[in-house]
Image: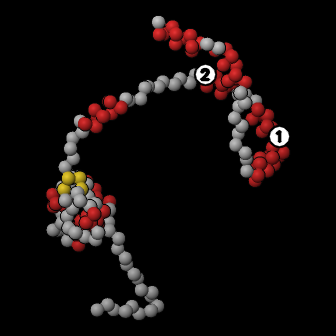
Amino acid sequence: MGAQVFRAFRNFNLENRAEREISKMKPSPAPKHPSTRSLLGEQLRNHPEIKGEVVSKDNKLLALLKDVYVDSKDPVTSVQVKDAETHQEPKEFRLPIGHHFDMMDIKNIPKGKISIVEALTLLNNHKLYPEIWTAKKIAQEYHLELNDVNSLLKYFVTFEVKIFPPEDKKAIQSK
């Protein structure tokens, strides 16, 4: 009984409502900037065939548009999203190594990741003492995978400043 009442309200005055929607004013395009308007007018004066192309319909494109098929799926409900969040494995964290610069605000770092300060420290240690700070030791110390450490040492280097003295002046010897 409720469906019949709902259907009657839904279909009440349907044709008049549809006609009213169709006869409404369509939204007008946004106003163009004066400089753009003048450039468009100039292009239309120089190339009058453009106006014909803009106004005409391209049957080939219309045929391609008719072949377009859109397949959509309903969005995931919030109940399913909450279930997915509850089944995540808890992350393991570690404390940051050393107290360099302003690292006091970092309380813990997920295992398998390092902070910027730690990355610079381990790259500098490896550059200065490569026999002590090997890839294996760095991986154990910072809880990283060996392939990641090897890639890090291969593709990243720390910043180094080299100043070459001009050839016509004598260089000042550092003590």
Disc 2 packing (10 Å; few <14; some 14–19; many ≥20): few
Type of amino acid at the residue the image marks with label 1: Pro
Q: Residue at x 20, y 67 (%)?
A: 98
Q: Nearer the viewer, residue 34 or 20?
A: 20
Rendered view: 132 above or below 144: below
Q: Nearer the viewer, residue 112 or 30?
A: 30
- The answer to whether 160 appears left or right of 10 in the picture is left
Q: Secondary structure at mark 1?
A: loop
Q: Which residue is mark 1?
A: 48
Q: Position of residue 120 (x, y in %)?
A: 29, 66
As measured in the structure, the alpha-carbon distance from the residue carrying label 1 to the one carrying label 2 is 30 Å
Can you see residue 149? no
Q: Quadrant of residue 123?
A: bottom left
Rendered view: 98 above or below 140: below
Q: Pick the quarter of the image with the C terminus.
A: bottom left
Q: Which residue is mark 2?
A: 66
Type of amino acid at the residue the image marks with label 2: Lys
Rendered view: 22 above or below 158: above
Q: Position of residue 131 (x, y in %)?
A: 16, 68
Q: Position of residue 62 (x, y in %)?
A: 66, 25
